[in-house]
Amino acid sequence: TNKPIIISFGMTEWFEVEIAMKILSETGNENIIPMHCTAKYPLELENANLQIISELKRRYGGIVGFSDHTESVEIGGWAAMLGARVFEKHFTLDRSSMGADHGYALEPKDFALYVRNIRSSLKSFGTGKKAYFPEELTGRRRFGTYLDANAIKGSKVKDLTINKTRPRTEVPAIMMELLKELSLSKDLESGSELKWIDLE
């Protein structure tokens, strides 16, 4: 059918996971979602072994998931940070109901919190790009670099007359010693803020 396949790997060792993924991939179906699972009900947090999620992602790429048998409402968010994007969680209207799964399943209020924690984690994940927010720049006690005299193209940074003052500029004052052998790529007037594009 080539429909997405969600396969949960409880009660397995890696060689069994590899065999199963090989069999599935040989069908030509590229929509296979391996799920980290420990088939213990309920599962204690210390036995959740969430790093398996990262390893599934490393080995197979694509979408991976977490079949969660803990009683935690936080763990889904942690799993999401490690790469899980599909989640299985037992749900019940009443944990005191008779039956094997009710006792560790989540009731509606806690299930809603479980989902919110996952979504909040994904929102906080970010881009991985390290940068300042404007609010951080204005509040930082860092010095910038401003020219105290006119300078012509080709001038060495070490020969410039620099005023190191606040606010911090694109080229921070603390880096000037490391940049001293670079040259200006264009003429700059006194008072100009030194920028990376000005250096070569």
Image (cartoon, rainbow, N blue to C red):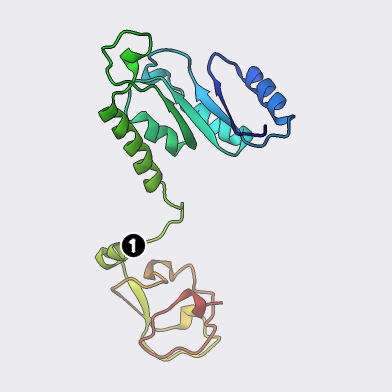
Which quadrant: the C terminus?
Answer: bottom right
In the displayed image of the protein, which residue is found farthest to the front? 1
Q: Which residue is mark 1?
A: 133
- Circle 1 SS class: loop
Identify which residue, 183 or 81, lies in the foreground: 81
| Above or below 11: residue 75 | below
Identify which residue, 41 or 147, lies in the foreground: 41
In the picture, measured across the screen, residue 188 lies left or right of residue 94, that is right
Dot 1, how many residues are within 10 Å of its Cα: few (below 14), some (14-19), or many (20+)? few
Which quadrant: the N terminus?
Answer: top right
Which residue corresponds to the image point at 33% horizontal and 14% vertical from the top-left?
A: 102
| Above or below 60: residue 100 | above
Quadrant hosting residue 143: bottom left
In the picture, measured across the screen, residue 185 lies left or right of residue 110, that is right
For the image, the number of numbered tags is: 1
Q: Position of residue 116 (x, y in %)?
A: 32, 38
Which residue corresponds to the image point at 50% horizontal and 80% vertical from the top-left?
A: 198
| Amino acid, disc 1 | Phe
Which residue corresponds to the image point at 37% horizontal and 29% vertical from the top-left?
A: 75
Q: Position of residue 135 (x, y in %)?
A: 27, 64
| Above or below 113: residue 183 | below
Q: Position of residue 144 (x, y in %)?
A: 35, 73
Q: Position of residue 23 (x, y in %)?
A: 71, 24
In the picture, measured across the screen, residue 74 lies left or right of residue 125, that is left
| Above or below 84: residue 90 | above
Which residue corresponds to the image point at 43% horizontal and 67% vertical from the top-left?
A: 175
Identify which residue, 42 or 28, lies in the foreground: 28
